[in-house]
Amino acid sequence: MGSTNPIKLGAVSDALREIDSQWRIKSVDVSSGVSAQPWCDETFAGARNRAMEALLDGECDIGIGIEGGVCWNRGKIVAYAVIYAMSRDKENFSISPTFTLSNELSKLVLEGKELGEATDLVYRGSNTKRAEGAVGMLTRLIDRKRLYKDSVILALYPFYNGDV
């Protein structure tokens, strides 16, 4: 897995437990190769880069990358994550559910702040991107780990489902 973020690691761990309890995770600190706050297609590139770097680490069969990003949609800024999975002979991706940002968060992101930093400023938090994230602060019900888990399963289905 191309991240040491405990939320991303927890989402992958939970997903793998549902898929096959024998799968093991190795977490490696890699660069996404994209800007600190990816926009739109850059989010896909960041997730794929993370998966590739994890795979190239050489000690795994499947590389997984998760990259959070933002994009314009219907006049609002939405946030989401791309989950990328790849082996030496195949790759797949999925996209988490999206959610709109509040006006306050949108303003700060448009000013160039990373969403995690903007969330900390608006909600007076500290490193919320390694905890509940913007989605947790906005919904008070869904945290980043929950947001990512099912999307990890969706990205991995070609690797465990022999029927496809």
Image (cartoon, rainbow, N blue to C red):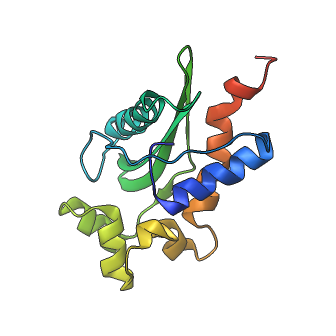
Q: Is residue 148 left or right of residue 150?
A: left
Q: Is residue 110 left or right of residue 64?
A: left
What's the residue at 32%, 38% (across, down)?
42
Q: Nearer the viewer, residue 129 or 25?
A: 25
Q: Residue furthest bottom?
A: 124
Q: Residue 117: x, y in percent?
A: 30, 70
Residue 40 image-quadrant placement: top left
Look at the image and tell me in which quarter the C terminus lies.
top right
Residue 92 image-quadrant placement: top right
Query: In this picture, is 131 found above or below 30?
Result: below
Query: In this picture, is 118 found above or below 90?
Result: below
What's the residue at 82%, 17% (across, down)?
163
Q: Nearer the viewer, residue 2 or 78?
A: 2
Query: In this picture, is 37 found above or below 121?
Result: above
Q: Residue furthest front?
A: 59
Q: Is residue 108 left or right of residue 139?
A: left
Q: Residue 150: x, y in percent?
A: 68, 47
Q: Residue 55: x, y in percent?
A: 48, 30
Q: Tally the numbered discs.
A: 0
Q: Residue furthest top?
A: 89
Q: Nearer the viewer, residue 139 or 113?
A: 113
Q: Residue furthest left?
A: 111
What's the residue at 64%, 60% (across, down)?
146
Q: Residue 38: x, y in percent?
A: 30, 47
Query: In this picture, is 75 found above or below 101?
Result: above
